[in-house]
Amino acid sequence: MEMKLTIRRVPTVVSNYQEDADKPRAGCGRNCLGDCCLPVSKLPLYAFKANPAKPSQEDASSTKSLVNILLTEWEDRMARGLFRYDVTACETKVIPGNLGFVAQLNEGRHLKKRPTEFRVDRVLQPFDPAKFNFTKVGQEEVLFQFENGAGDDSYFLNNAPITVADRAPNVVAINVSPIEYGHVLLIPRVLDGLPQRIDPESFLLALQMAAEAASPYFRLGYNSLGAFATINHLHFQAYYLSVPFPVEKAATHKIPLSEDTMKSGVTVSKLINYPVRGLVFEGGNTLNDLANVVSSACIWLQDNNVPYNVLISDCGKRIFLFPQCYAEKQAMGEVSQELLDTQVNPAVWEISGHIVLKRRNDYEEASETSAWKLLAEVSLSEERFEEVKAYIFTAAGLVQADEEKVSEGEEATYKPVPVAPLPIAEGCLVLQ
Amino acid sequence: MATSGAAEVDPGDRERQQHDRRRLASSLTARYSDWVLEALDELPGSFLLTDPSLAGHPIVYASRGLAALTGYPRREVLGRNARVFQGTATDRAAVAGVREAVRAQRAHQVAILNYRRDGSPHWVLLHLAPVFQARDGSLLHFLAVQVPIDAARRRAGAGRGAPGAVLAACREEARVDEDFPCASHAGKVFVDMDKRGLEAEEPCVASDSEKEKATNTANSIVSALNRYSKLTSLVVSGKRCDSVGIPALSSSLNLSVGRIKQSFVLTHSCLPDMPIIYASDAFVSLTGYSREEILGCNCRVLNGPGTSLEVFEEINQHICSEQACTVDLLSYRKDGSSFRDLLHVSPIRDASGKVAFHIWVHLDVGAKHDFNGLTPEVWQLGAVGAVRVAVRGLSASGSLLRPSQ
């Protein structure tokens, strides 16, 4: 008989239709995103320009910018009362320290939910149309379609027919349990029923969204199965938070690449002085170059059953990749009860330093040390990380140049050591 | 000063009693609105309001919590002076401190031994706060909040000398002449010395959390009064208005909201009369007021003949319940011309989750606009979203307002 590794956790409710997804339904009388309703519907459309990295004619504060339209539509859904709670009423603070972890007290997110069994030892699982997926979401939860307009400029239409002829639409929908104002889900080709699995095209779409948003405070994230994704239907998360994330401030060490691999313009670094070991991919001559390298790395990880999280930061120019093992440790009973009691699920946002806490006590006592302690459990060991890194390099066609040997003392840098905080002027952070 | 007051009212005289009750109630409703009593009833805590302008400085309002704490039903305290709660062992020094604060019309906090209706003594932290009329700074009411001091904790701290026992012997004549809350009770000693027991003998220090609770309760009551006073445009405040400068947004917040294209103002939700502390460029060009003219004003400044007071009342109701609303209003520019104003008002919370500002987005319905394909109502919400993210991000790590000079 097959051994199954599972953890019990409270599932996050991302849609108002999730809770009754298991009930059988005769026909479909509501405007959902399924094959029954979507093709005959009209939805707002945001068409991004052919080259999202190109500076827009409209400045980022224009009411026509992606972030503005997204926040406008989001506020409208809030006014309509579609969210499970008012996230702006949740306390949030920057924890004093070098990295500046952001803590939020969110007592409502997991309220009234029972823990559910999640299989964590299979990063790839087949799409199951019977389980909750985004085709079951009501259209009022959708903010707009997000498509490549292929023109020189982006545009927005408040009402546009769905173009299913060539391919299923990508949609941006609200997360009804937001962890921050403007929290949305990007669902590539919603009708195609893709499982939670990175492919180069979808990953490029996520980068294009970050580039189109043109704000360092608008980030996208991805959780694989086994790394705290709740729903096995391909989706990225995104939200706007005008605070630098700790991982964006963490020091990195550039890995020298052979001249051959340098051609794409993509550079790879390793995070240092951060509790979770991870790789940072930057640059690339085109968005495509960066998307290809990172998606190859992700594909190796998922094909080899290594759970991982991805943060798309700095307008799609900087990507953090974190292979992780927390859920596995949790399933094996290797995580301390003290950490389990906090019920924090270390997914991409937590790993990046935005930590949502469920108990007031944890929130009030949150410190850089406690955040570090939690995140350190998420990280692969140095040995395992180096092993995975080597595989990723091979898979992504990256060749490491001969390098000075890794110094013996490097392991010791993985602890909260004092590093000078970056001189960041509030409200005008430019990440280069 | 005579010691008149409701204690002297003949309880049998129904008609007179009813007249008195109306007189007491109008002390509040005339200054705030008819809704104020209901709103106060909703507030937790044990507190009362007194009116220094009425003979005997009577209690004009007593909260539900007060009955639970003191055993006095509301009808038994209305019209009486607040000294009804004092008894023989009440610390005279504490009473003197209260009296002094009342004379100086300032806030005061003190631990004091009070007596319940059944004569049993209990320690409370008394928080006294004056309520002023914002316009001329005249005193309207006194607010007295009573927070019970945790007896178990208090006993642990015993041994620092007990003034209670000594002061119980305080001469009667020293406490008959003040007609002020918490001054001593005038003559009737309804506490049997035997009943005082330990409660009265031990010293009392309120904990920080009790002090904070008292202050918070008082603040929330004053801000409720403040909100309701707007309906009579009297406007009250916990602080005497010295035409202090209006606080300015911090430079980074100013920068963030400065990019927003819609016509809107931000009002400060905690200051009396909710003054405008920010006005967008589009608002300035819509209304013709300069920033200098508009900052510090209340949003009523755009009202004129034909502006519906019912609609303004509706906005106030939504503000009180921390809800957003969109209304259709007739507003006036500086030059006296009017426009149909699609007005959206929404509370803006800071990083602690508390309402810090209100945003008022104005739209001249008659003017031509590019709404980017959206309905005007949804287009207006864009300003709300943008302000929310700016305020939330900045207040998590810094300050929203420039430090006061």
Image (spheres, coloured by chain):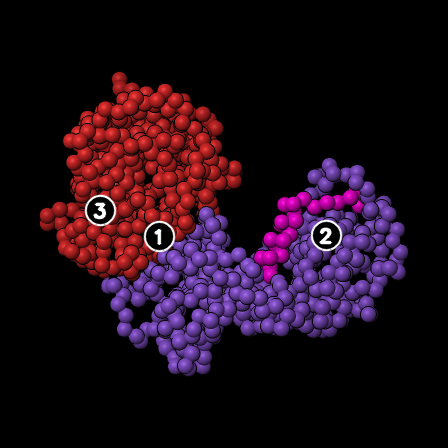
Q: Amino acid at mark 3?
A: Gln
Kindly identify which chain the residue marked by label 3 belongs to. Answer: A
Subunit that carries the residue with mark 1 = A
Looking at the picture, tell me which residue is in the foreground, A305 or B30: A305
Dominant SS in magenta:
helix
Residue A36 in the figure: left or right of residue A337: left
Look at the numbered disc 3 and give the secondary structure of its residue: helix
Residue sitting at x 67%, y 50%: B147
Q: Residues within 10 Å of mark 2 (few under 14, many from 20)?
A: some
Residues marked 2 and 1 touching at CB (< 8 Å): no
What amino acid type should be assigned to the residue bearing mark 1?
Leu
Q: CA distance from mark 3 to mark 2?
A: 62 Å
Mark 2, residue position: B110
> Where on the picture, by quarter, is residue B49?
bottom right
In this figure, which residue is indicated by the disc labeled 3?
A208
Q: Start and end of the magenta stretch?
A: B196-222
Residue picked out by circle 1 = A82
On-image quarter of the C terminus of chain B:
bottom right
Residue drawn at point x = 72 percent, y = 64 percent: B104
Q: Residues within 10 Å of mark 3 (few under 14, many from 20)?
A: many
Say above or below: A228 vs B306.
above
